[in-house]
Amino acid sequence: MVSLALDSAILAETYDRVSDRQFNHGKLLIEELQISTGESVLDVGCGTGRLGAHVAELVGPSGEVSGVDPLPLRVALANGKRRPNFSASVGQAEDLSRFAVGSFDVVFLNSVLHWLPEKLGPLREARRVLKRGGRLGISSAARERPHDFERVLADVLSSLGVTGTAEALGSTPHKVTSDDLKSTLLLAGFEDPKLQIRSFTDHFTDTDDVIAFYLASSFGNFLSNLVPADAARVKPALAAELERRRAPEGIRLQRHLIFTVARAGGADGGEPASRRAGERTTRR
Ligand SMILES: C[S@@+](CC[C@H](N)C(=O)[O-])C[C@H]1O[C@@H](n2cnc3c(N)ncnc32)[C@H](O)[C@@H]1O
């Protein structure tokens, strides 16, 4: 099970430093959303806010970007980006009740959906806070096309006889297939979903670089449920397998992501997931 209690200042700062991969594919997602000056945007699972700060520049002073993320240390780094039209707060995709119906032109989740155990509730929340016709953008690991690293890790664990799969051990455990995501989007009130799998090639300096990336990206969950004796065996075996993939630029690994853009259909969304007294406010 994914824990939100394993993050640390070091992991959060490392993520801010090593997340060029998420930032770069996130910029491609943002391009697909065709964001314009003056729009209001919600970044769900904003992390340390690199992409949110980029979108704040795109919407300009007449626009506004809000971010939510459950990890306070990452929210603090996001607010430290000091963009006057970007503010982040602690919160979760499952409960966007702090935002009124129809608050946003665009909602996006970049490398976040595969961390959510249940998709329909968060997508209904995204629909509720979007204006009718507003755009939703998602990039998410694809269940039908695992990343190279997940296959390498699964082989290593199985060769060592370590119980549990790579998924159970914290590498993006809640992936969806494109088909499931499409049908869930329609159920949540989105129209005209366009999905495509895009592949990205990464290069890493060495095994420590790979591990640091996955630990920071998983906010401490990566391999966190291994007993220390097993963890000690995994690292050298992983290093041996990863070295076989070394190219002149470094250890070469491909990732495959479902890129999704959809429109909020129908009437404005209904009640928020949580309606606890006093919890609902408008954005400003
Ligand atoms: C790989 S990071 C991506 C961060 C950011 N979107 C980016 O592009 O760099 C995944 C993020 O999902 C967030 N997350 C995990 N569970 C969440 C939930 N239930 N609701 C919203 N965000 C969540 C984590 O806190 C983490 O910041």
Image: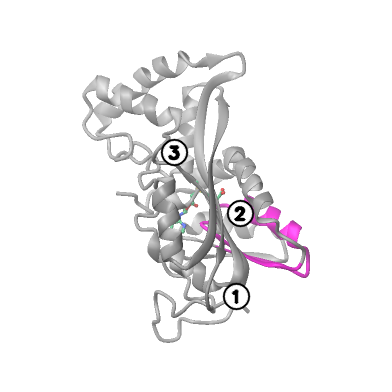
Question: What's the magenta region?
Answer: 38-67
Residue 152 counted in the magenta span: no
Indicate yes or no whether the magenta region holds residue 40.
yes
Label 2: how many residues lie within 10 Å, few (<14), some (14-19) or many (20+)? many
Provide the residue designation for mark 2: 49
Mark sitting on residue 43: none
**Considering depth in this image, is 186 or 176 the residue closer to the camera?**
186
Task: Give the residue type at disc 3.
Answer: Leu
Decide if ligand 1 comes within 8 Å of the CB at mark 1. Answer: no
Among numbered discs 2 and 3, the one appearing first in the sequence? 2
Q: Residue at x 59, y 54 (%)?
A: 77
- In the structure shown, which secondary structural element does the residue marked by tag 3 occupy? helix
Q: CA distance from mark 1 to mark 3?
A: 34 Å
Q: Secondary structure at mark 1?
A: loop
Q: Secondary structure at mark 2?
A: loop
Q: Is residue 41 above or below residue 146?
A: below
* Residue at 46 percent of width and 79 percent of height: 270
- The residue drawn where x is 35% and y is 41% is 170
Q: Which residue is mark 1?
A: 103
Residue at the location (40% across, 17% down)?
241
Q: Is residue 76 in view from this perspective?
A: yes
Badge 2 amino acid: Gly
Earlier residue among tags 1 and 3: 1
Q: Which residue is mark 3?
A: 215
Are the residues at dot 2 and dot 3 in contact (C-beta closer than 8 Å)? no
